[in-house]
Amino acid sequence: MTRRIRVAIFLPALGLFGVLLAWALVGIPDFGHYRGPYGYLLNRVALPERHMTNVVTSVVFDYRGFDTMGEEFILFAAVLGVVLLLRQGGREQPDELNDSVGSDGVRIGGVLAVGACVLVSLWLIAYGFVTPGGGFQGGAALASSVVLVFLVSSHKAWSGVASDHALDPFDGVGAGGYVVIGLGALIGGLPFLTNVLGPGVPGTLWSGGSAAFVNWSAGMEVAAANLILFTEFIDEYVVPLAAGDTAG
Amino acid sequence: MSWMLPLPVVIPLLGAAVNVALDHVTPRWLHTTIALVAVTTGLCFSIIVLVHSMSGETLHWFGGWTPRSGVAIGVGFAVDPLGAGFAVLACALTLAALLYSIPYIEAATRNYDALVIVLCGACCGFALSGDLFNMFVWLELAGVCGYALTGFDIRRMSALQGAVNFAVVNTVGGYFVLIGIALVYARTGALNLAQIGRTLSGQHPSGLLIVAMTLIVCGFLCKAAIVPFHFWLGDAYAVAPAPVCLIFAGIVTDIGLFGVGRVWFTVFDAPFGSHQRFVGDALLWLGIVTALVGGAMALVQQHLKRLLAFSVICHIGIMLVGLGLLSSKGVAGAAMMLLAHGVTTGGLFLAAGLLGVREPVRWTAGLWFCGAIALIGPPYVGVYMGHALIDDAAVELGRHWVQPLIWLAGALAGAAMLRAGAQVFLGLADDYDHGIEEGRDGPVPYLATITTVLVALGTAVSVVPGLAQRVVRGADRFRDRAGYANRVLHGIPMKESAHLPVVLQPTSTESLIYGSAALVFAVALAAFAVRRPDAARTRVFEPVLWPLRQLQTGVIGDYVMWVVVGTAVLGGVWAITLR
Amino acid sequence: MSVFPYLVAGWICVIGLYGIVTSKHLIHLALCLTVTQSSTYVLLLAVGYVQGGGPPIFKGVKLGTTAVDPVVQSLTLTDIVVSVTVLALILALALDVHDELDTMDPDRIAELQG
């Protein structure tokens, strides 16, 4: 089938599809008139019951924490998959690659930036139940902070920081920790993932109860997973480049 | 017993996490052991859950968030017998696949075991969940594992092609499901299936609901590989490693159909119940076309695993016919066929995998023919009971013409397998390229034993006394929207029901005749194709199937185009008929 | 104008699909997939918007203040993770395809046909 035939069949169908979609979309209650009840109920009860001021995070790690476990394992499985697909025996760190950053200013500034960004990321995770943030956002920020190491030094320094030997345990412990916390409640005779450390003081680090541990394990998994993904792809990019392969 | 419900899902996931955490520390045999223990534990718990689910829905509200005055505020598992049975099947087939993989998959490959058991956990989660968005999460998780495992042989272009096509088509399908969920949420403000159904009951069918149902159903049908969403399957299942194909064919394809049934009987039955024939008939026709296309395409395949892939499409189509009849017997027929077909086809994939280890032997030939006959379904063999229940359901609705069409489709796929068996295993063709990568390693008796167990179990499904009656009872529960909502949202227990006898389910004379005729027809067609291969190919198969083969281009742009065409046409039909 | 945000979501979905079907490069195709996915973000967030509502965060805000739906925001978070993972997998597959065939044209990678 040629491309022209494909597009000729496709465009009318896409038109019909678009019309149907629009038909459905105009049937939604007017913009700004969300009718509930799910969201309204949670907005009312999350603070009094759970003492969490950030309702989104309370939904993510407490009310619908089980969805989040599945979501965490999607990331976990994707990392396994990418490592599986990019396993290319014999690709080792080339010696002749010289990509060190020459400027001292960039290096010093970079190291400071790494430190600052890591702190901000940890803060994002820690205060997820109070202000915007949480394990997923903070974990992604943490991974990006560590990636700065690559930008301000060299691939070699980066490989020292982020190898799969170093990251896999974090990945596994982060994902498994979520399940273990859930199982802990189950062993105690409560439903899976029950928040056993009942409400803390609103607006503080401990407002999450035991969901705080869930939050931290998610943060750890997300950071490790993102770093593994970055490592895999950067190796695909840098190593052939160093070997003199111009195709990259 | 409700504390057990999460375990078939979370124990395999935990096993995978432990394996990755210990990846560089512990030897491979320990990883394999952890994976086997995790799946076996999941299997044991899912069996207990199945037994308990027979007497009423078991519920598990995660985090202890039980519904308040009919509004679900958390995620819940609500387990009925069909869902629990599906989880049992998922764990059992994954266990078989893992055992087969121990010698079969190259020892150095990291992460393989972990991906396989995460896939198992995801399928269990999908089957047990009572929450629409939670189902989407498990669907995506199963997808992500599936894409990676399909591309396992990264040095073979066809494996990469299969994985890309699988990934893109199913991802688009997943987005359709998600848009549908967003539309339903906009209307109802709920994600729990029972609560959505309760909110929608008595509502007028609106454009929003029609399109939402179309998107969700079409998204699931992409996963289930129903025509015209089916093209990716032939590319993907032909190239995945044999034990992975066992899991794909046995459970991963079927979760799409399971999802369609689940959302129809708990959610969309409410607003469209008075128009249910239009929905059912659309599914029925899609199923018939799928079955015939799958059976016919199987006939022209040389590649053994690709042949099996089209046989999967054929039988998925027949299951959709059963589901589309929307009656308890129809659904039960689909479930019986899912069980028999999943186990048998899985066994056949493993038999095909054996060819990569050593030359064909008589023993594998016997297995292959036994499995092929079980998939045709002569009286009381293999898929027969599923066929017979679907026959009964069709007759009760006055749709007598359904029976010959689906028996014919199954016989076509069976003929293709018999012919391939004669040519590959009995050596009746000189230069038959069966497309199996050779040079695999492993102890043949061990691998053959696992294969034999699967084929034998699949062949025997129809003669298990009392099984069919219990599946029909389970289908009653699967279809009972009001009862489901009462049990889930208000904890009202189920009425005690009559005890079921442990006897063989009687079948109609028509089914007996059709089953026998299908076997005779398949053997005759296979004999013709083997005895006169050139005549069969140039005068019969090629001319008839030329247009179908032209459509199977292997190009992802074409496949996504067909997904959009199929969704638009189905949506258009329902827009006209359901208003 | 009260349906305009929803129609934006619909439009993003449709152009994403057009990009996928007509794509000539696997990486372009993967990005088109994320375009289609973005339509679900827009739709989910738009569905949960409440006129005059603030974020569902009650830090320094009195409980009971009008706020938007927190559930759709949490669903969007999940959705983003799904999108990232699928993108990573397809990019990895695209790299493998490039290693094998030296092409990224999805029309030319079909080995199995018919």
Image (cartoon, helix red, strand yellow):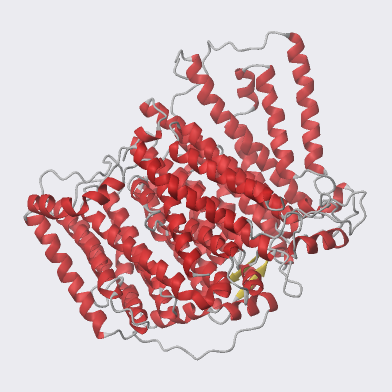
Q: Going by the picture, which residue comes out furthest to the bottom?
A: B498
Q: Is residue B410 left or right of residue B491?
A: left
- The front one of B219 and B342 is B219
Residue A43 at x, y percent in the picture = 82, 59
Would you identify the image quadrant in which residue B326 lies?
bottom left
Q: Going by the picture, which residue comes out furthest to the front?
A: C1
Give the quadrant of the N terminus of chain B. bottom right
Q: Residue at x 51, y 61 (%)?
A: B214
Question: How many marks on residues?
Answer: 0
Residue B265 visible to the viewer = yes
Would you identify the image quadrant in which residue B203 lies?
bottom right
B231 in relation to B161, above or below: below
Residue B209 at x, y percent in the picture = 58, 65
Residue B26 visible to the viewer = no
Q: Is residue A160 left or right of residue A246?
A: right
B51 in relation to A11, above or below: below
- The front one of B246 and B229 is B229
Q: Is residue A151 left or right of residue C29?
A: right
Q: Residue at x 76, y 75 (%)?
A: B69
Residue A118 at x, y percent in the picture = 77, 31
Q: Is residue C58 left or right of residue B531?
A: right
Residue B38 at x, y percent in the picture = 53, 57
Would you identify the image quadrant in which residue A211 lies?
bottom right
Q: Residue at x 47, y 15 (%)?
A: A243
